[in-house]
Image: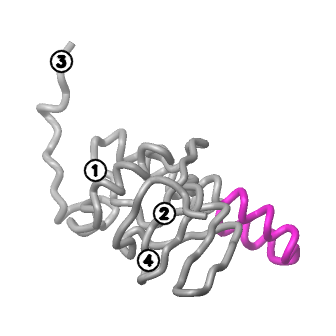
């Protein structure tokens, strides 16, 4: 059996087939990126969960880490209850984005291209601590690049 990697061109960020700049491959926090990918899966579809607390904009956000796929499913459930008239539109947009993400993951993996850093972090059963104010929300989505600190576990 021959190793076809020797005939492959090395990755050239200046000619990325999806147009990603070189810095899109480098996460803000490599350890958080590795942790999130481990629990949510490289394709962001895992059903694994773990408690996580992050600091974003000086505010503590604590909850259960979930995949983007699970976040979409739970958002659909909430939208069905809160705004059923918007559910079809949300599903169309969310499923198109999910399909594009899946196709890109498969294409980049098959071509042995690096995956871009995760853009979003998804939590459920969330408590947000901001100064003397506390808010409980069922779902939260935040930019990974905005996280300035994190730890395992959930505060109460």
Front position in the image: 136 or 24: 136
Which residue: 30% across, 59% down? 17
Q: Are marks 4 and 1 in contact (CB under 8 Å)?
A: no
Please report the bounds of the magenta region as a residue range: 72-94
Q: CA distance from mark 4 to mark 1?
A: 27 Å
In what element is the residue under mark 2? strand
The residue that label 4 is drawn on is: 56
Q: Is residue 11 left or right of residue 116?
A: left
Q: CA distance from mark 3 to mark 1?
A: 22 Å
Foreground mark, 2 or 1, reads 2
Q: Residue at x 39, y 63 (%)?
A: 150
Q: Quadrant of the C terminus?
A: bottom right
Q: Main secondary structure of the magenta part?
A: helix
Q: Where is mark 1, residue-wise?
A: 114
**N-terminal-most mark, 3 or 2:** 3
Give the labeled residue for mark 2: 53
CB under 8 Å between callouts 2 and 1?
Answer: no
Cα distance in 3D space between marks 3 and 4: 48 Å
Mark 3 or mark 1, earlier in chain:
3
Residue indicated by mark 3: 2
Q: Which tag is nearer the camera, tag 3 or tag 4?
A: 4
Say above or below: 63 vs 87. above
């Amino acid at each position: 059996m021959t190793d076809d990697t020797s005939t492959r061109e090395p990755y050239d960020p200046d000619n990325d087939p999806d147009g990603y700049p070189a810095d899109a491959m480098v996460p803000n926090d490599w350890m958080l990126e590795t942790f999130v990918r481990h629990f949510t899966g490289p394709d962001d579809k895992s059903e694994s969960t773990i408690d996580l607390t992050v600091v974003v904009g000086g505010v503590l956000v604590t909850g259960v880490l979930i995949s983007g796929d699970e976040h979409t499913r739970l958002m659909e459930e909430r939208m069905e209850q809160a705004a059923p008239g918007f559910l079809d539109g949300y599903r169309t947009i969310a499923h198109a984005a999910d399909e594009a993400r899946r196709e890109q993951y498969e294409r980049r993996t098959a071509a042995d291209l690096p995956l871009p850093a995760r853009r979003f972090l998804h939590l459920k059963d969330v408590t947000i601590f901001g100064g003397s104010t506390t808010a409980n929300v069922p779902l939260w989505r935040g930019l990974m690049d905005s996280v300035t600190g994190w730890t395992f576990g959930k505060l109460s």
